[in-house]
Image (cartoon, rainbow, N blue to C red):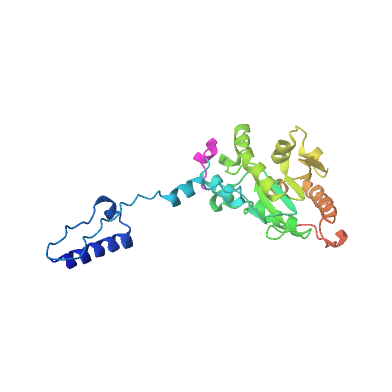
Amino acid sequence: MTAERKQSLALFLATLDDLLGSGYASKREYSFSKDPSSSDPPAQPVQEQKEQEPVALHAALKKPVPPDSLHRIINEVYICTACPLHKTRISGVPGEGVEHPVVLVVGEGPGAQEDKTGRPFVGPAGQLLDKMLSSIDLSREKQCFITNIVKCRPPLNRDPQLEEMEACMPFFSRQLALLKPKLILSLGRIATQWLLQTNETITKLHGQWKDYKGIPFLPTYHPSALLHNEMWKRPAWEDLKILRAKLQEYTDQKPELSKQKEPEV
């Protein structure tokens, strides 16, 4: 091989090394001694290349943790194992609705239909709740967010136990901080007593405005209770009218309450 061809080969290998970025040149130098029959100078050795740090990987590791979000809470609820309810659930039920609701509706826990679908209040009690909200011009799709104190169904729809409510409370607190509702409507004895930390009965508490972390809080009867006891239907309707009167402070629409229809049970 002539000196000229050797020189061309050395340059080709060095160029190829740069293009591929293989680091091959850093491990080997291309150098040929001068051919006595040629006047061309010998090829210069390729300078050793330093291996580069994986900058992209380091940058990813240093990236700040994303802020809390409703989507993140949903994912955490689905995989939560903080209490024994995860052993018997089909699906966690994080809650659903608009991101900045006028009203946050809070029940005690999912039932059978909710456990199957992963959605809150979709069974008979949920259908009645939709009618109750609609009677005062509210809906889960436009003005509300609906959730429960515990996000997994207690077996046989029993009352949630203390450890279960304590385990789920961080989810509710984070939801409240993100949603920033104008008002809270609590449904039934369990949710009301737990959030207000009281032993007073729902019969005594319903229809009275309370304060929860600076947010107006109105207890009323749980829709499932109305399905089993019609004597609470009228008091629940009066509670809804109280809620609607308060809503007038936060909305532009002010329908006459006398024209609103009482929800059918």
Query: Is residue 12 inside the magenta stretch?
Result: no
- Picture layout, residue 98 above or below residue 186: below
Query: How far across and down, in percent of the image, does residue 172 sit?
Result: 65, 43
Query: How far across and down, in percent of the image, does residue 25 sit?
Result: 27, 55
Question: Most prominent secondary structure in the magenta stretch?
Answer: loop
Q: Report whether 50 appears left or right of 236.
A: left
Res. 93 in view = no
Total label count? 0
Residue occupying image coordinates x 68% and y 60%: 141
Residue occupying image coordinates x 49% and y 39%: 87
Q: Nearer the viewer, residue 262 or 59?
A: 59
Res. 79 in view = yes
Residue range of the region highlighted in magenta in the rendering = 81-91
Q: Quadrant of residue 248?
A: bottom right
- Picture layout, residue 35 above or below residue 207: below
Query: How far across and down, in percent of the image, does residue 262 sit?
Result: 80, 57
Q: Quadrant of residue 255?
A: bottom right
Q: Quadrant of the N terminus?
A: bottom left
Query: Is residue 85 inside the magenta stretch?
Result: yes
Q: Nearer the viewer, residue 214 or 91?
A: 214
Residue occupying image coordinates x 30% and y 54%: 47
Q: Quadrant of the C terminus?
A: bottom right
Q: Report whether 38 appears left or right of 243.
A: left
